[in-house]
């Protein structure tokens, strides 16, 4: 089953704080948080048992910071991301089904000092298969979001409550791919921005994992047999 987003929403902290609350969807599932900060957050501590997959910042006078994190099979419905510095934030959260968030691909974020087209990076080489490709863009001034990447029309979200930072996300389901370049967002004017791409593979069933493990074991045994036979031919060791 191809990974899918079953619930999603946005939130923000409009006053400087070190405690950034995220209200997640209900139920037990794979979940994700994409969060931007308007200034150096210092040390960022993710919720317990969550994994930070990628971080970055745009690096200029209107700097925006972006963190992407996930937790598999969690019943968390409300969590807190903490920062050692008091900053503003904006976030998008996701609830997934049919996903394998322990094996997501998150390339280094694309950053621009001044531009109106946040550009989620190419995924690079993926293992051929079906993916939910999610994109996220953050920016540092009160520019409006004019459009999402072409064809990324699934689960579009944007949080523009604060003057800064702002954030948007949009996904697309892609079958039998080995790479993907999502295209660009469009803002109403130039500003510092940062953009990320998240390739989420479909979940592998227990049966598939068992078969895969068996095939890998057979390959190892076969390689060992070939090594022993080769040594026997050379007269160094007899195969057993």
Image: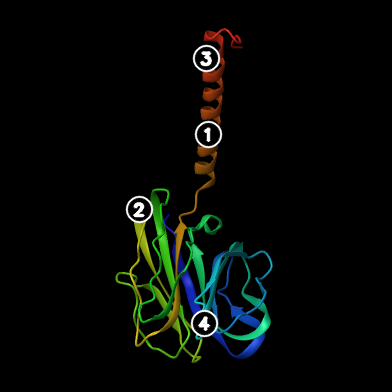
How crowded is the residue under tag 4: few (<14 C-alpha within 10 Å), some, or many (20+)?
A: many
Q: Is residue 21 above or below residue 208?
A: below
Identify the residue at image location x=33%, y=69%: 183
Q: Quadrant of the C terminus?
A: top right
Q: Which-is-in-front pick, marks 4 and 2?
A: 4
**Nearer-the-camera pick, 234 or 206:** 234
In space, the residues marked 2 and 1 are separated at their CA atoms by 23 Å
Q: Mark 4 vs mark 3: which is more N-terminal?
A: 4
Q: Is residue 16 above or below residue 125?
A: below
**Nearer-the-camera pick, 30 or 80:** 80
In space, the residues marked 4 and 1 are separated at their CA atoms by 47 Å
Instruction: Tell me residue 100's x, y (percent).
Output: 51, 56
Element on which disc 2 rests:
strand
Q: Which residue is mark 2?
A: 177
Pointer 1 with pointer 3, Cβ within 8 A? no
Q: Quadrant of the N terminus?
A: bottom left
Q: Mark 3 vs mark 2: which is more N-terminal?
A: 2
Q: Which-is-in-front pick, marks 3 and 2?
A: 3
Identify the residue at image location x=63%, y=90%: 16
Element on which disc 3 rests:
helix
Which mark, residue 216? 1
Identify the residue at image location x=30%, y=71%: 150
The answer to whether residue 170 is left or right of residue 235 is left
Q: Mark 4 vs mark 1: which is more N-terminal?
A: 4
Which mark, residue 63? 4
């Amino acid at each position: 089953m191809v990974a899918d987003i079953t619930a999603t929403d946005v939130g923000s902290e409009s006053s400087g704080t070190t405690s950034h609350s995220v209200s997640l969807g209900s139920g037990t599932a794979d979940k994700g948080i994409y969060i931007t900060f308007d200034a150096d957050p210092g040390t960022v501590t993710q919720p317990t048992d969550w994994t930070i997959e990628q971080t970055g910042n745009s690096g200029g006078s209107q700097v925006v910071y972006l963190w992407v994190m996930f937790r598999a099979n969690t019943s968390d419905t409300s969590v807190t991301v903490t920062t050692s510095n008091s900053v503003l934030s904006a976030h998008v959260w996701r609830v997934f089904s049919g996903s394998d968030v322990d094996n997501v691909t998150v390339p280094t974020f694309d950053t621009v000092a001044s531009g109106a087209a946040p550009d989620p990076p190419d995924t690079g080489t993926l293992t051929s298969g079906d993916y939910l490709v999610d994109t996220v863009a953050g920016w540092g001034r009160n520019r409006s979001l004019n459009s999402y990447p072409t064809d990324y029309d699934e689960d579009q979200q944007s949080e523009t409550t604060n003057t800064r930072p702002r954030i948007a996300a949009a996904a697309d389901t892609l079958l039998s791919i080995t790479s993907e370049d999502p295209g660009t967002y469009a803002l109403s004017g130039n500003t510092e921005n940062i953009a990320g791409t998240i390739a989420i593979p479909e979940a592998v069933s227990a049966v598939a994992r068992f078969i895969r493990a068996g095939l890998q074991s057979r390959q190892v045994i076969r390689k060992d047999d070939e090594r022993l036979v080769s040594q026997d031919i050379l007269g160094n060791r007899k195969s057993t």
